[in-house]
Amino acid sequence: MIVIYHSPVGLDNHRVDNSGYRARIYLVDGLYPLLGWGLFFLVLGSIPRGRTISTEFVNMPSALFVRACLTYSTMTATEGIERLLFAYCDGLDRGDLVAASELFGSDGLYGQVDGPAVRGASQVLAAMQHSVRLYDGVPRTRHIVTNIVIDVNDDQVTAQSRSYVQVLHQPPGGVLGPIAAGTYIDRVHLTNGSWKFAERRMKIDLIGDMSTHLFHNPFV
């Protein structure tokens, strides 16, 4: 049995998008259902003729197989969502505001906690272009995301996540330092094989000098 293999993030010989699926295929994961069936028949063969066994026992290999599939699916969803979070930061820091805004699809919300929000990629892009200062095409920032907590729903195509964000910035000729720190609160969903933001809310608790990073707060 051949299945798509799930391996750690960051291996250069795997091509991965934020859906979390990999182009490389291995045989090893197919051993899990095979081992389940092998154990089933081994135990079944040891039962004396004429004896009966329960329905729960007969269904054991199927249950093991389903559980293995669900575990694999959850891991893939979690990795795909992590890549979505990283792709947002990467787009901003490279000055590719179009790429960052496209992560919201046609109706994703983007704004601050308990504040107004814009909706959809075109409005998100306009908000970013109206607020982020660029220097030779880049904002000279690094958005660092940590403390990521992801809760994937039972449907495996929607989830919630929370993460810390710290923004480092160095204006031209200036000093490198942190200018903001806070929390991203997200709802995400799987759309056409890619994870998108259904809603991203920002709660910026610690604010430094952002005058050389932002023209103004786009959400007020």
Image: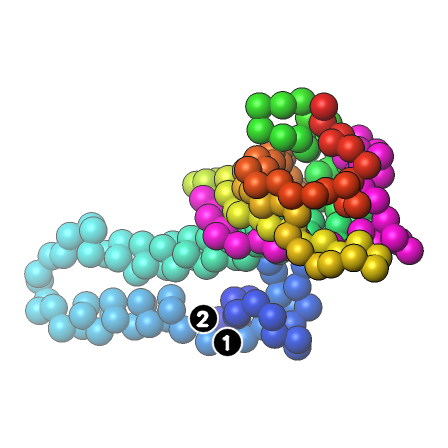
Relative depth, front residue between 202 and 173: 173
Q: Which amino acid does label 1 sit on?
A: Leu
In the current view of this chain or complex, which residue is farthest to the right? 136
In the current view of this chain or complex, which residue is farthest to the front? 174
- Residue 199 vertical placement versus 73 (above, below): above
Label 1 close to label 2 by CB (< 8 Å): yes
- Badge 1 density bin: few <14, some 14–19, many ≥20, Cα 10 Å: few
Relative depth, front residue between 202 and 53: 202
Residue 18 locus on image (x, y percent): 65, 55
Where is residue 127, by image quadrant? top right
Where is residue 113, by image quadrant? top right
Secondary structure at badge 1 equals: loop
- Residue 39 vertical placement versus 115 (above, below): below
Secondary structure at badge 2 equals: helix
Residue 97 locus on image (x, y percent): 81, 46
Task: Report if residue 122 is visible in the image.
Answer: no
For the record, the magenta segment spans 123-151
Q: Name the residue under label 2.
A: 30
Residue 131 locus on image (x, y percent): 80, 36
Residue 33 locus on image (x, y percent): 38, 66
User: Residue, x 68% and y 68% (percent of image)?
Assistant: 15
- Residue 47 vertical placement versus 192 (above, below): below
Q: Mark 1 points at which residue?
A: 27
On residue 75, which mark appears? none
Give left or right: position of 144 versus 34: right
The answer to if 144 sits in the magenta stretch is yes
Q: Distance between the residues labelled 1 and 2?
A: 6 Å
Location of the C terminus (image quadrant):
top right
User: Residue, x 81% and y 36% (percent of image)?
Assistant: 215
